[in-house]
Image (spheres, helix red, strand yellow):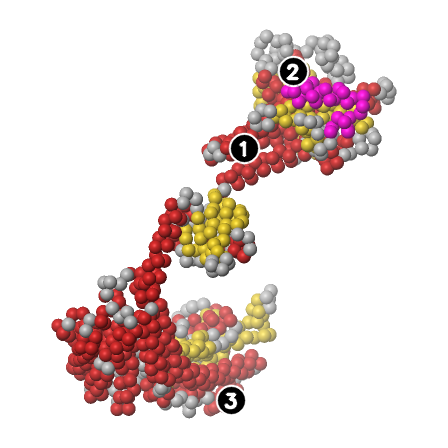
Amino acid sequence: MLAVGPGYASPIFPAAGLSLVVVLYSGHRALLGVWLGSVVLNVMVALLQQTLDPITAVIALLIASGSTLQAWVGASLVNHWQTSDWRDLDRGSDAFIFLLLGGLLPCLLASAVGVTGLYVAGVIQPGDYIFSYLNWYVGDILGVLVFLPLLIHLLNKKSRINWKINLLMPMLLILGLLWLAFYGATHWIIKEQQYQLESDSQALTKNIADRLLTHRELLTSLRNFIEVTPEFSFKQFKLFTRITLQDNPDIFALSFNDLVTIDQRSVYEQRISALSPLGQFQITERDSQGHLSAAAERGEYVPVRYIVPLESNLPAVGFDINAEPIRRDAINRAITTNNMAVTGPIQLMQEQKKQISVLEIMPVLDNQLVADKEQNIPRLLGFAVSVVKIGEMIEISTRGIVPSGLLFRITDRAAPKGKELLYFSESWSDSDKVSERQGDLTTGLRMGDRDWLLTVRATDAYLQQHRPLLAWFMGGVAIVITGLIQLLLISINGRMSEIRWTNEAVNASLDNLFNNANVPIIVWDSTNKITHFSKQFELLSGRSAEEVLAKNIVIIFRDSDINRYPKLFKTSLRSEHRESLELPILHVNGTIRTVLWNVSSVLGDNASPIATIAQGYDITELNKIRLEQESIALDMTLLVDTANAPIFGIDAHGHINEWNKQSEQITGYTKAEVLGQELVANFITDDYKAPVGEVLNKALEGEETANYEFPLYTKSGERVDVLLNSTTRRDASGKIVGVVGVGQDITELNKIRLEQEGERKEATAKIIQASKLATLGEMSTSIAHELNQPLNVIRMAAGNSRRKISKGTADLEYLNAKLERIEEQTVRAAAIIDHMRMFGREAKEELKAINARAVVTNTLDLVGEQFRLAGIDIVTEFSEDCPSVLGHSIQMEQVILNLLANARDAMAESDGDKKITLRVFEDDKCVHITADDAGGGIPENVLPRIFDPFYTTKEMGKGTGLGLSVSYGIINDMNGTLVAENIDGGARFTITLPSVS
């Protein structure tokens, strides 16, 4: 819109201001350089546009002469009237005179010389002279007004660099906005032209699309005819298509092509020969020389059966369109979509004249026959085909609607490169007529399943009807506003320099304070833009100050915290002047750092917040330690709470501080009801308060206490006999802080012991249960001692860590070592408690499949350490793959435990090697477990009675004689056998149980 000829002027021409500055600073000797620079510039433009010839070379010399004359006159006027005052430009009056003498007046000369030269050379027409002159003058004036003051200030060595940035940048911004307004008006005019162009393009698109739709409907009608009348003759085909061909001259031919397989070819050619009006029928294709010949053998053929008009398409009869790639591609697409497919541009084999055509192909189905019975897909008979001449089709659809000067073309997007052109206007390639102001306008067209592209192009003749004057009005406004802005900015130069100098000193002092601080500090203003970022904060966040300054504060936070942080920080800005809060930040490496923020408001003159300053303390590692400690404490609490024995805890004053689920179940009191209560005073009967208190006091004094039995009355008034083992509880420093008690409900055991000898079967059952409970009680006592050791280690490690953290001497390596120690002991305690809980369960469940090898291993986990301390070596020999047996795993463990205890007692007085060998193996669909000892064997007179109840050879008080009897009964209940025999140097007990799959 604003060009003078092809590239001879621009809306803003910076060289006009640059040439004047060069002559002002360098004198008249610079005029030759100005002239040569202008010549080179215009010659380069001609070279780039490929228009350099003698005429354009002469034009370049004339334009260079006009530009040199303009610079010389401008410099002479300025030096005459202003001498050297133009170098500072500190006052508005000086700036006004400078711009008037250097720009407004001299720019009249260059415009006149340049435009006159273009007119004489015939580049512009007489009607464009004034238009081009005004355009040239506005471009030069704006170039002087915008760039002349900028260059003067940049070359003034007395100016401070900060002054340049803060004064020139706003000036450039304002001028840029004016420039945008100037172009906005021009673009509005161009948009109007574009709107007209789009309207004309839409009209073309609609007519062509309507024509394409007509073709689709015609081909659909032909397909329907064939499907309804599958046995049609050539006469019927010709009669049906006659009106269609008459009304649509762009349709070159209509045909029906059968789908023929290779095994059908011979029969098909014979059948069509009888039907064809031409007689002998043969499927043909083009050979390498382009001649028609019999088609070669292949899987499928799509030959032309009937085609109309026949006279002009005789060579096409029998031609296999499946033989050529472009047509075959369209056939495959039609089969896939079961809809109309269109080929790319083709040359018809039956037409000698070269013109672009396409084939429209639509599948024809036989709805009476099914190709796929499972999916009920109709069989494909062939294809209805329409041959369309693109040129005639476009001329028919666009007749009378193409405006003068409007060019267009149609291309096939999917066609190979170089073959995509379908149609184009006659003057499409004539570049002299095409306008450079409007780009090509493209619109998509859908031809069947193929995408065509309609490209519309406007010529200069098309656009000249809409030449605007609004742009020149905007140009005049831009000159006035630009001049006023320059005068305003130059006038406030002095004041801005003083303010900036003061601000620089203050900012330097503040930056020094922040950078030397030994804590991370960050400051952001009321718009959340970061204004200061200390060195320590760079280390904390991994970001440099250059990355974050003037950025929103959210840059240092996680995405999930972006909506949360303003609510927290704005509390400080709006009302409270100081607030501390914990909020994580995102390190540049992706890690999260937890920061304790100390936030304060920075108040302005009216006591309202204008900024926020925050100190950050990295507490990431401290939080990790705290969370790990809480996790350990939670794990220990869960272990105690889920233990299968009643466990309670008291503090140094005898008040309850722990009460697990088993304690709740036995007593009927919930944890909430007992916490903080005195154990002895509130829950022990009067006659046992003194002895129970004595046991607990001894534990509080650090003494080892033996198991103690006492009665306990539940919430419902029932009596429960409890066997208690109490252990001292210490903190990390070793100070006694309480007692942990592990109890066992032995009520049933006492009932059995007190009951009279009655019915033997009932007595025996109770004795067996009592034996198991006694074993469990003995195990609970041992486990309590075993559990005490990891608990003490955990307490000491946690206490030491807490003490070092409180003193600030804890380092990460020390804390990691302590946490690993705590984790090891926690795993150990958990394993002990889990097995104790499982062993203590009453075996009321039905028999189930258990792993004999796992039962032996679990038993050894309970007592293996005791045997090792007793100097007994336990050797295990297990088969790799052992089937399961039916039984109770806990009762099986009780049997193994009894056998191990007997073996241990048998070897107690032995001076030789103390060794027990345990084997688990399968033989004859049975699983065998053997226990061999080196205790000298069983006397022969004892072997027959070894499994009798209450029979024992041990000293008084060391055995009840029930262990082997109970074991024998347990194995018998599992449908197995338990056998004792002597071996070399000892005895062997063999358990045999039937295996299950």
**In the displayed structure image, the side of residue 708 where residue 563 appears, left or right:** left
Please give the label number shown on residue 667: none
Where is residue 317 drawn, in percent x and y? 43, 81
The disc at residue 239 is 3
Residue 194, compared with residue 993, is above or below; it is below
Q: Nearer the viewer, residue 44 or 956?
A: 44
Image x and y of residue 373, in percent: 60, 66
Question: Which residue occupies 53% across, 31% down?
Answer: 803
Which is more toward the observer, 220 or 126?
126
Distance in Å between CA atoms under marks 2 and 3: 113 Å
Examine the rendering and report whether any part of residue 194 can be seen.
no
| Residue plotted at (47% across, 82% down) | 209
Q: Quadrant of residue 763?
A: top right
Give the quadrant of residue 492.
bottom left
Q: Secondary structure at mark 2?
A: helix
Query: CB under 8 Å between callouts 2 and 3?
Result: no
Q: Secondary structure at mark 1?
A: helix
**Is 210 situated left or right of 652 in this image?**
left
Q: Quadrant of the N terminus?
A: bottom left
Disc 1/disc 2 C-alpha distance (Å) = 48 Å
x and y percentages locating residue 392 in the rendered image = 40, 87
Residue under label 2: 903
Span colored in magenta: 678-707
Is residue 696 visible to the viewer in this orientation of the structure? yes
Q: Earlier in the sequence, mark 1 or mark 2?
A: 1
Q: To which residue does mark 1 refer?
A: 802
- For the residue carrying disc 3, how many other residues have a C-alpha within 10 Å: few (<14), some (14-19), or many (20+)? few
Question: Do residues under tags 3 and 1 come within 8 Å of each other at their CB atoms?
Answer: no
